Image: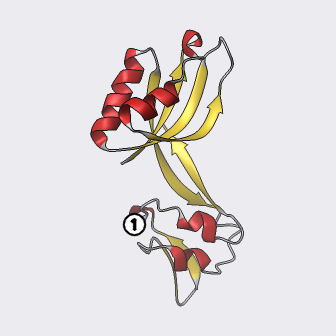
């Protein structure tokens, strides 16, 4: 399971090796997506935790017990339809067929309900029109 979180650290805990502790104690695979950390000040990390549900829940409890504020994030794929040339590269790469091009107009259609966040559209679009948006 993958969970995206915003971790807000109090200034006094900035120098503590939390990522190391999470990896060592809970076997969490951590992908740091964005960081804003300054010594002695509040720090923020946008992270992706990848582990089983129980390990992630234990890690979250551990962080909260150590003064770390946690916000869950959800993400969605979006694309710039005004710049799209309807080439179909993303549709060909989309396993759940959330992206399709059909006759008679041959325009790209994005069905967000079918999207499984595989992110293949991000790399298949030659114009890099797809992006991931995060919301709390």
Q: Tell me the quarter of the picture where residue 116 sits.
A: bottom left
Q: Is residue 55 left or right of 66 when viewed as pictured? A: left
Residue 20 point in image, percent of width and height: 50, 29
Residue at image location 42% in from the left, 39% down from the top: 28
Secondary structure of the residue carrying numbered label 1: helix
Residue 24 point in image, percent of width and height: 42, 32
Residue farthest toward the bottom in the current orientation of the protein: 104
Q: Tell me the quarter of the picture where residue 11 sits.
A: top right
Q: Is residue 94 left or right of 33 when viewed as pictured? A: left
User: Where 53 sits versus 76, above or below?
Assistant: above
Residue 113 point in image, percent of width and height: 39, 62
Residue at image location 37% in from the left, 28% down from the top: 60
Comparing 136 with 121, the one in front is 121
Comparing 111 with 35, the one in front is 35
Residue at image location 32% in from the left, 33% down from the top: 57
User: Where 30 sits versus 101, above or below?
Assistant: above
Residue at image location 58% in from the left, 74% down from the top: 90
Tell me the colour scheme of the image.
Answer: secondary structure
Q: Is residue 4 left or right of 53 when viewed as pictured? A: right
Mark 1 packing: few (<14 Cα in 10 Å), some, or many (20+)?
few
Query: What residue sits right under mark 1 in the picture?
Result: 114
């Amino acid at each position: 399971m993958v969970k995206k979180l915003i971790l807000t650290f109090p200034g006094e805990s900035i120098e503590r090796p939390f990522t190391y502790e999470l990896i060592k104690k809970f076997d969490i695979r951590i992908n740091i997506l964005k960081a804003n950390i300054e010594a002695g000040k509040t720090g923020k990390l946008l992270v992706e935790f990848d582990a089983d549900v129980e390990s992630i829940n234990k890690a979250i409890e551990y962080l909260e017990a150590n003064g770390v504020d946690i916000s869950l994030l959800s993400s969605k794929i979006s694309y710039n339809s005004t710049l799209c040339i309807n080439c179909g590269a993303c549709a060909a790469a989309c396993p759940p067929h959330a992206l399709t091009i059909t006759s008679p107009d041959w325009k790209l259609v994005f069905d967000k309900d079918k999207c499984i966040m595989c992110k293949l559209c991000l790399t298949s679009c030659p114009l890099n029109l797809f992006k991931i948006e995060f919301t709390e």
